[in-house]
Image (cartoon, grey):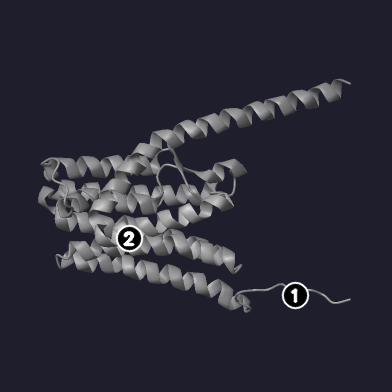
Amino acid sequence: METKKNFKLVSSKKTRVILPNIFTLVGVCIGLSSIKFALDGRYEISILAILVAGVIDGLDGRIARLIKGTSKVGKELDSLTDVISFGVAPAFIMYFWKLNELGRIGWFICLIYVVSVALRLARFNVNSSEEPSWRDNFFEGIPSPAGGVLVLIPLIYSLSEFNLAVINNNFFVPIFFLLISILLISKVPTYSFKKIIVPRRMSIFLLFGIIFFFGLLLVYTFNTIIISAVIYFLMIPISSLHYFKIKRKFRTQLNDKDNDDDDEDIL
C-alpha cells in the first residue's frame, strides 16, 4: 500500500522558519529607512516606506502559516519590529515635520504614542491565545500598522490634493496623535479581516476591487490613503456594534448550554 507524501512548498524545516523572519527583518529595515527619508525632508518617500512595511507585516505571518514555518521567535520578532516600524518611525517622521515646533511637549507626545504602540502589542501577545475563535475577527483597539499609517494622516493630507479646509497643524497634530494613542490601547473592537469568507461567485469582484484599489493607490496615492482612512474611522462604530451583537449571541448560547447541563444533572 502506497503512502501519500504531503506536499510542502519548502521542504527544509530550518528554511521554513527563517524565510518569514527574513521578510520581517526586511520590513523593519524599510520602516527604519523612513526615518532617514524624513530627516532629509523626503516625506513622500517616508510615507511610502511605512506603507510598504505595513504590506510586509501583513504578509510575513501568512507566509509563515502557508509554509508551516511559524515559531515563537518569529512571533516575538514580529512584535518588536512593529514597535519600530509603526511606533518609533512614524513618531520621528511627525516630529521632524511638525511636532518639533512644540519643543518638549512635541517630544513628549511622540513618547506617549510609542509607548501606546508597545503596550498594544504586549496586550495582543498575551491575549491572542486566550480568546474564543469568534473573536479572531476583531482586534481590541486599532492594530499597530493601522495606527502607524493613521498617525501620519495630517502629513498625508498636506501632500494630497484635498483642500477642503485649512488646518492649524500646531493644534491638530498633537490632538490627533493623542487620539490615535488612545485608540491603540483602548478596548474598542475593530475588524481584523483575518477570516474573510468570500463566496466563489464573488471572488472575481473581490479580485477586481483589489486591483482597482491598488491602481488608485499608484495613481492618486495620498488621496486614496485619506479616503481609506476616513472609511476606516467610519467602520470603527460599525465593528463595535457587530462585536457586541455576536458577544450577546455567544453568551446566550453558553447560558442555554449551562441550563441544559443543569437539567441533565437533576434528572
Q: Is residue 150 above or below residue 245?
A: below
Q: How many marks?
A: 2
Report if residue 177 is visible in the image: yes
Q: Is residue 186 above or below residue 266?
A: below
- Locate residue 4 relative to residue 29 in the image: left or right: right
- Mark 2 Cα shell of 10 Å, populated few (<14), some (14-19), many (≥20): few
Identify the image quadrant of the N terminus: bottom right
Secondary structure beneath dot 1 equals: loop
Report if residue 152 is visible in the image: no
Q: Looking at the picture, tell me which residue is in the foreground, 73 or 39.
A: 39
The type of residue carrying mark 1 is Lys
Q: Looking at the picture, tell me which residue is in the foreground, 243 or 98.
A: 243
Identify the image quadrant of the C terminus: top right
- Locate residue 83 relative to residue 99 in the image: left or right: right
Q: Which residue is mark 1?
A: 5
Q: Residue at x 18, y 55 (%)?
A: 95
Q: Which residue is mark 2?
A: 215
Q: Residue at x 78, y 25 (%)?
A: 260
- Locate residue 9 relative to residue 140 in the image: left or right: right
x and y percentages locating residue 118 in the rendered image: 39, 52
Secondary structure beneath dot 2 equals: helix
- Mark 1 Cα shell of 10 Å, populated few (<14), some (14-19), many (≥20): few
